[in-house]
Every structure is written in structure tokens, then in C-alpha cells.
Amino acid sequence: MPLAFSVVHVDASAVSAGVLAILCPKGSLVPAGLTALDDALGGALSRSFARGAFVGKRDEVLHLSGGATGPERVLVIGMGVVTDGPAALKRAAQLAARRANGLNTASMAIIVPTGLNAVDLEQVVIGASMGAWEYRELKSPPTEPRTTLERISIVVEDEATAAAGLASGESIAAGYSLARRLQMMPGNLCTPDALADAARDIAARHAMDVTVLGRREMEALRMGSFLAVAQGTPQEPRLIALEYRGAGDARPIVLAGKGVCFDTGGISIKPAPGMEWMKYDMSGAAGVLGAMEAIARLKLPINVVGLVGAVTNMPSGTAINPGDVVQASNGTFIEIVNTDAEGRLVLADVLHYAKKYDPVAVVDAATLTGAVVIGLGNSLMGVLGTDATLVQDVLAAGARASEPGWELPLWPDYEEQIKSDTADIKNTGGRAAGTITAGLFLKVFTEGYPWVHLDVAGTAYSENDLVSLPKGPTGRPVGTFVEFVRARVS
């Protein structure tokens, strides 16, 4: 059941909820607006602040029992030293909802003593939805009844003014939830056909056009690069195109995503430890589908095409071998020196296919390289592109969405690393500058439009608990896609 959000204008002491979460920056004193609540708690808030039991460090949590009336529990959540207000609010709301969801309550209220504008409110809604999100579809019902969060109210100064931020926050939160659900599904359930069905469902609910190409249609289009990855699996590969039309005949933006539903590495097989995480190799595709869901709910007056290349990468007697040469749909001959560098083979034909839409810009996302994790860790996505202005627009969109990125150069000297003795190019240039050479490989297939690539291998999912979110899917880059598209609305 999706979370129900609302806004209310009420004194904190009068909040009727199982949990009241107060989001506070570092160094705060008990705000004047919370004095009645503090009185109801017997002065527990002011004593905690005065004694240093709570100072507002990032992710700090103070848990108090409620008074005889009002909220049953109070959580005070630290935001740290705030340099980016919306990002700090989003993270604090995530943590608040995650904590509240474990307290056996159906309702939570959130209050920010400093007040909220529409942008802040949107981020609180998104954060709370993400923090409360769980994937329980494949777990047996608990032996003891468990109450989970169903309703979240946000305390605001003006309910009418807050309505727009609430609605947009819910729309984007729905996109994140859809993406994370697809990411979390195991590879035997989240197949290429399952991604196609998800796209059809989005199209049916939002009156979009959807096209799904299979092996035969891709053969007719000479997509030898994409189909090379599909050689080793009996599962039908799918190229999915989802078209949202909010601006008549205007040229669209294209969002493209790598959808490798499970990646064994193929003949260049991955080590067994940790291979189960490779169900997340379709996170770029999940980001595209989640963004299309959010864009449609926002009813943005713009045209957007979402493209997904969906396949599994398996070893078998028919799988591609290192040293094989295939031809992509733009005519480029590719020597495959490592079958575990398969995402770029899929995206090569997807990016060339994007040209048919005469796009004003193309932005793709993929869990493409381990090198980006070595270089940028798990907080920054790698950003590379052919148009300097477009790169900056995407970086700004990521910053607004609390999904920061860092630009890496498509330095021409590195093209030497992907030159092949046998074919035009090879699909990997080795370990050195691995994210950059992968970007240079993709660039070959982007002629005719400005293009940016997001390498989200370090940010789309986490193998460790993130405090505000559990380990697993993060839904990135749904927010970056949505913010980028919103900024292009004329």
C-alpha cells in the first residue's frame, strides 16, 4: 500500500500521530514553536538540548516518549551543519521515516522548526517516502503482527501554499519507489520481459506510446552489438521505447538506460563471491522507468522518450567469446576482448537507435564500470559528455536532486586504448582510465546529438547500510533525470 501524505497546520503539541519527527540543524536551541510540546514532555526537549544530549549532528537521533496527549513518541533528527538545505532535509526525512517504520506505528508527522518552502517540502516528501520504503513481496508474513507506516503528515505554515510541493514530491517519490522495486527484484523475476511489462504498465496508466523490439526486430536493424550480449541466453532481449508527449511535435529529450537484468560476466565470468549483487546491473534502466513514471505524474509540458536495452549476460555454448568481432547498427566493427564489458555493447545500439527521434539531447545512465567506484567512491556518479553546456546542466540537476556527480574528461589521447588491431574499436581499454575509455567507446555511437553519460555503478545501489537508507537500491538517478527534464521546460 503506498504511503498517504498530507499537510497540516497545527501546533506540535497537538499532533495526533504515533511518531512526531523534528528535523533540526546542528547547534539549534529548542525553537519557540516547540515550547508547548516541550511543556507536554515535562521539559525533556529543553533539558536534552541544554545538557548536550542532542546537538544536531548529522544522523543523530534523540528518541523521547510522548506526553499524555499529542504524539506517542518524539524523534529529534539531526541535520548537521546545513550547507545544502534541501539535501539535508531529504536525508533527515529518510532517517526519520526509516526509524519510525520500525516503531510499530501507522502514522508519523514531520515538523521542521525553521519552516518549509515548496522545494524543501518536496524533498521532505521524497525523503520520507524513500526512508519508509520496503521490499517485502518475497518474504513470508511475520509470525507476530507488525504495523508499518501508512500515513505521513507534514506540519506547515500554510496548507494551500504547500499543496504544490506535496504533489510534486509524491510524484517523484513514486518514480523512486518504482525504480527501487525493479532493482530489488531478483534476476529470475526481473527479466527483460518484466522490464517490458513495467514499461507497458506505465504507458497504460499515463497514455504513453510504448514499443518493444525483440531479437528478430533487432536483427532487422542490424544491432549486432546488442545481440552479441544476448547470444548466450535463451531469454529474449528487449529494446523498449516509452514515449511521453507533453509538448505536441517538439523534439524530445531521450533518457536511455542499461538494463542488464543479471550479469554473470559471460565467458569472462565474474568471481562467485558477491555475484548476487549483479541483479542491480539493470539500475540504469530502472532509473529511466522511474523517471518516466515521475515525469508523467508531474504532467510536464515537454516530450521525453525513455529507452531501455534489456538483456541478461550469461555463459553458454552460444555465448560470445573474447576476440569475437561484431558489427553495431551504425556500421562500427567491435572486437570483444572482455565479455564482462557488455553494458557498453548494449548501449551502443540503443544510443544509435536514439538518433531516430531527432532528440535535442540524450542522457544515458548505466552501472557501467568498476573504475568509477575506485575513482569516485559511492557518493558521486561519473559524468561524461560531448557538450559542455549539457554536462553542466546535468551536474546541476544532480545537485538539485541530492545526487551529486563529477565530470570526467573524454580526453582524446585515451582513444588509443580502445583501438583494435582486428576491428575498428575494442570494447575495453583496460584498467587505466576505465570509466573514461568506456565513455569514449559510447561516444562513437552518439553522432548527431548532444549527449551525456552517467556512470552510476557506485551510487545506484549500496552493499552497505547507508544509515538513512538500508543497503540495496537507492533509485538513483531518478532524481537527476527528473530535475534535468524539469529544467528544460520552456
Image: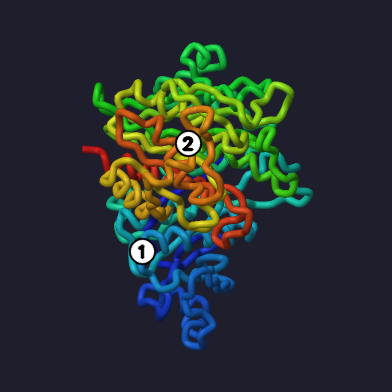
The quarter in which the N terminus is drawn is top right
Q: Residue furthest left?
A: 490
Which amino acid type is shown beneath numbered disc 1?
A: Gly
Mark 1 lies on a secondary structure that is helix
Q: Categorize mark 1 by other alpha carbons within 10 Å: few (<14), some (14-19), many (20+).
A: some
Query: Of 67 and 124, which appears nearest the observer?
Result: 124
Whether tag 2 and tag 1 are in contact, CB under 8 A, the answer is no
Q: Categorize mark 2 by other alpha carbons within 10 Å: few (<14), some (14-19), many (20+).
A: some
User: Is residue 43 placed above or below 321 in the rendered structure?
Assistant: below
Name the residue tied to disc 2: 419
Name the residue tied to disc 1: 85
Q: Residue at x 38, y 62 (%)?
A: 10
Q: Residue furthest front?
A: 421
Q: Does 462 sit left or right of 332 as displayed?
A: right
Q: Position of residue 159 (x, y in %)?
A: 32, 53
User: Is residue 238 placed above or below 152 in the rendered structure?
Assistant: above
Give the label, 2 or 1, closer to the camera: 2
Residue 383 seen anywhere in this rendered image of the structure:
yes
Which amino acid type is shown beneath numbered disc 2?
A: Lys
